[in-house]
Image: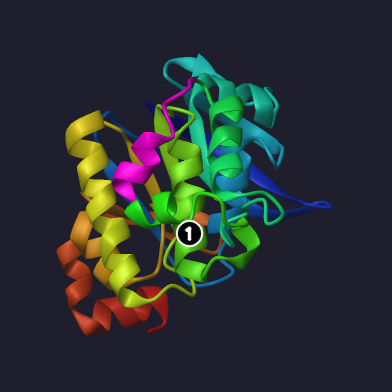
Amino acid sequence: MLSLTNVSAGYGGAVVNRAVSLEVGDQEIVALIGRNGVGKSTLAKTIVGLQRAESGSIRFAGQEIARLDARERARLGIGYVPQGRGIFGAMTVEENLRMGQLIGGGSRPIDYAFELFPILKERRTQLGGTLSGGQQQMLSIGRVLCGEPKLLLLDEPSDGIQPNIVEQIGQICVRLKAERRLPILLIEQNLDLITSCADRCLVMQKGAITHQMVPKELLDPVVARSILAL
């Protein structure tokens, strides 16, 4: 579904990502892991079109997209949940979800988000900015899903979220894979979330993918400490 070949990107002439190659297959959850500051979020922005690729190829569903803008990539079906959630704080929960229907590659009834996250239905008239951090993360994910994505890219969804909601996000990822055959690229450092849902892990160090591992290897504290500085 998603394939990157020798993708490099950066800011102001400084290279952040160096010749990154990776693939996310159909109905696969791939975790991109690594310490803070190694370039994971820059790569996410490059994939969705918010950051320009300096070189390399980005293919989505068989189509080269490296020169398409972010809106065009969203229309093709790349759903992006950014780090920090990025909801519209001055809009209600329902209005946020309807924005997702307009931005994405398709349109799914907002009741689907309510089914996955029942608390959103209870808060449908509440302003997004007044929700708790965990509820805002649910809203951010639900909004993207209302656009009926063909690929879901989650950037640090556990950041600042209470453990029970992190667990729920992991369960939702597994459900989306099983029921919707939705491939997911999960950028994350939370070991519980990674091991609960990921099929495989790609390790990023100094802006490059250095190796691949299976999630259960992260249960070794020595391995986890060396990769994530835990």
Q: Is residue 214 magenta?
A: no
Q: Quadrant of residue 71?
A: top right
The boundaries of the magenta stretch are: 106-117
Q: Residues within 10 Å of mark 1 (few under 14, many from 20)?
A: many
On the question of residue 65 being in view, the answer is: no
Q: Quadrant of residue 19?
A: top right
Please say which color scheme the image uses. Answer: rainbow
Query: In the rendering, at what x and y percent does residue 138 appear?
Result: 43, 55
Q: In the image as oriented, which residue stretches furthest toward the top?
A: 63
- Report the front residue among 216 and 48: 48
Q: Residue at x 48, y 72 (%)?
A: 35
Q: Is residue 97 left or right of residue 50?
A: left
Q: Is residue 115 magenta?
A: yes
Q: Is residue 9 left or right of residue 38?
A: right
Under tag 1, what secondary structure? helix
Mark 1 residue type: Gln
Disc 1 designates what residue?
A: 137
**How many labels sit on residues?**
1
Residue 95 vertical position relative to residue 105 in the rendered view, above or below? below
Q: Residue at x 18, y 79 (%)?
A: 220
- Report the front residue among 180 and 102: 102
Query: In the rendering, at what x and y percent does residue 78 appear?
Result: 50, 31
Which quadrant of the rendered structure holds the N terminus? top left
- Report the front residue among 183 and 107: 107
On the question of residue 122 being in view, the answer is: yes
Q: Residue at x 67, y 22 (%)?
A: 68
Q: In the image as oriented, which residue stretches furthest toward the right?
A: 12
Q: Quadrant of residue 27?
A: top left
